[in-house]
Image (cartoon, helix red, strand yellow):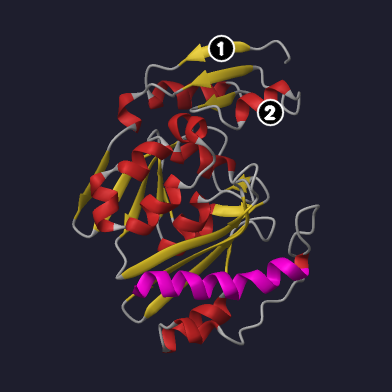
Amino acid sequence: MYALNYVKAKSVKEAAAFLAKNPEAKVLAGGMTLIPTLKQRLARPTHVVDIGSLAELRGIAAKGGKVVIGAGAKHHEVATSAAVRKAIPALAGLAAEIGDPQVRNRGTIGGSLANNDPAADYPAAVLGLGATVITNAREIGPDDFFTGLFSTALRPDEIITAVRFPVPDQASYVKFKQPASHFALVGVFVARFGKDVRVAVTGAGLSVFRVAALEQALAKRFAPESCDGVQVPADGLNTDIHASADYRAHLIPLLARRAVQQAIA
């Protein structure tokens, strides 16, 4: 690791002010991505601003057809929250499948979204459920938040404080995971809100994305069979040592079918 300065923020406001004055600083929440990145010398921040212990970033509450999760909530807390499990069991199930016990007990939802790893699970939930990302400065809609590979709409001095999820009528998440890392080779989140359906895919491209063809088919009839015959182009999808773009394209409608089957079950 390179030499750097450690700053423990006393509030989100203090952390944001420090980031505004130090553009090369990085925020530390759970550290599940930042610490390995520093160890591999892939990042060289001047400062690390620790917000992991801030009480204002914690808490999970369900009210008025919404579930609001503080950005500092650990994956394990989301997975075991009675409020989440009752209102959006698909979201609790997604959190329970992230990484391993160490990652689930250290990693945070805010950190995962801010990092926007192309194979991360939470981006699929945010995009699939149409959630709103709340920061210290504004609210950002799901279709505007994720902008590309490890890239989001967050400004340099902007910090995620919470995520507000609408409660769907039915939802499910299914992923085909890499067995060692548990990252999604392809993960598909399907959610139905009345006649509207959202289908979000992670792991297949440079960033999470929606599949309009599946959404349209499922909006007409929310049944597993509606996914049959839907073709997803392989253009622009990832090819690596684990799977080709063609294979990932083939998996998307199959996993969507399984997700719908679970949702209606």
Q: Is residue 249 magenta?
A: yes
Among the 4 quarters of the image, the one containing residue 88: bottom left
Residue 115 in the image: state x and y as whole percent. Answer: 58, 40
Point out the tag, 1 or 2, that comes first from the N-terminus. 1
Q: Are marks 1 and 2 in contact (CB under 8 Å)?
A: no
Report how many numbered discs are placed on residues in the image.
2
Image depth: mark 1 or mark 2 in front = 2
The disc labelled 1 sits on which kind of residue? Tyr
Boundaries of the magenta span: 246-265
The reply to whether residue 20 is in sight is no
**Is residue 89 found left or right of 144 in the rendered image?**
left
Say which residue appears at 60% left-offset and 21% top-offset. 22
Query: Around disc 2, counting alpha carbons within 10 Å, would you say few (fewer than 14), some (14 to 19), or many (20 or more)?
Result: some
Instruction: Report the disc number at residue 37.
Output: 2
Residue 32 in the image: state x and y as whole percent. Answer: 56, 30
Say which residue appears at 32% left-offset and 42% top-offset. 80
Helix, strand or loop status at disc 2: helix
Residue 5 in the image: state x and y as whole percent. Answer: 61, 10
Quadrant housing the N terminus: top right
Residue 6 drawn above or below residue 127? above
Most extreme residue toward the left is 64
Among the 4 quarters of the image, the one containing residue 134: top left
Viewer-closest of 194 and 7: 194
Main SS, magenta region, reads helix
